[in-house]
Structures are given as structure tokens and as C-alpha cells.
Image (cartoon, helix red, strand yellow):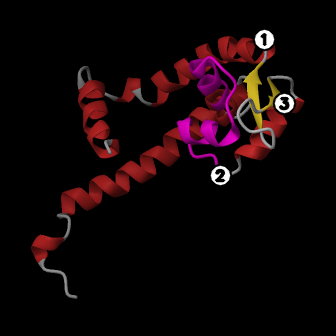
Amino acid sequence: MQLHKDDGPDDATVTAWARLVIASRVVLGAVEADLKAAGFPPLGWYDAALELRRAGRALRPLEIEERMLIAQFNVSRLLDRMVAAGYLQRQPCSTDRRGFEVALTDTGHDLLARMWPAYRAAIQRHVGAKLAPGEAAAFGEALGRLIAR
């Protein structure tokens, strides 16, 4: 099957795609570096803890993975490290005795509270400060259309 000019994206769309992918990688790397410099664990730890706090209950590992803001290809290892650090606790699954759920500990709640100011500042430094007034809202709206299902 041969593509016709009308079948594919125009040059502006291809450029937007490439810049979206690169910007995501660059900004995530910069935010991660800021968090590390401030003495915090990786962004995935914050993300997993935040999803547990938002849920207000223990979640199965798959549920956490589905809710996470950033890609986390090995959630089980991430959760193991967070349990070992005392931020999460494992408990038997209430609906499936073969599985387990994880819950946020008081130490995990504390991590979120301590980490947010550094994360917030990194978001401002690497995103907010680079957008003109009003651009963030328009950009967020456009990106929202890309992720709408």
C-alpha cells in the first residue's frame, strides 16, 4: 500500500511529534536531576506514593502501574525498594488471597510532603519558566487532546 501525500502527517505535525518526545525526555531528566541533587529518591517513588495517597487505600501493583504519571516498566522492583525504605507496607489482598496490596506508611506520607516543594520548583524551572503567560493552559489543553481516549 502506497501512502499519498494526504495520508500522512504534514511537516509541522512530524516536528511537533519529535519535539514532544524529546521535550518529555529532556524535562523528565532535568526534574529527576533536581530531585537527586536535593537528596530525594527518583520521581517514580513520588509518583507511586502519590497514587496511593490519591486512592486513599491500599492498591495492587498493577493498579499502581496503571495510574502512574510516568512509565514504570518494573513496578514490582520499585515497590520492593519503597517497602525496604519504609515508605510502603505490603498486606494481603482483600479480594484475592494469592496477591498482595501495598499501602502508604506515615513515612511515605512524609516523603510526599518533603519532596513536593523540590518537585514543584523543578516543574516551574523546567516548564513554567519557559512558557509565556497563557501558554501553559493552551499547551495543557492541546496535550489533553492527545491523551484523550
Q: Is residue 55 magenta?
A: yes
- Residue 41, compared with residue 3, is above or below; it is above
Between discs 2 and 1, the one toward the N terminus? 2
**Badge 2 amino acid:** Phe
Q: Which residue is mark 2?
A: 73
**Residue 5: image location, x then y, percent:** 12, 75
- Residue 54, compared with residue 67, is above or below; it is above
**Residue 2: image location, x then y, percent:** 20, 87
Q: Is residue 54 magenta?
A: yes
Q: What residue sits 58% from the left and 22% below the top?
A: 55
Q: What residue sits 55% from the left and 41% below the top?
A: 66
Helix, strand or loop at label 1? It is: helix
Region of the chain picked out in magenta, as a range:
48-72
Helix, strand or loop at label 3? It is: helix
Q: Which label is found at residue 106?
A: 1
How far apart, in angstroms, are the residues tagged by discs 2 and 1?
26 Å
Q: Which label is found at residue 2?
A: none
User: Is residue 100 left or right of 55 when viewed as pictured?
Assistant: right
Q: Which residue is mark 3?
A: 83
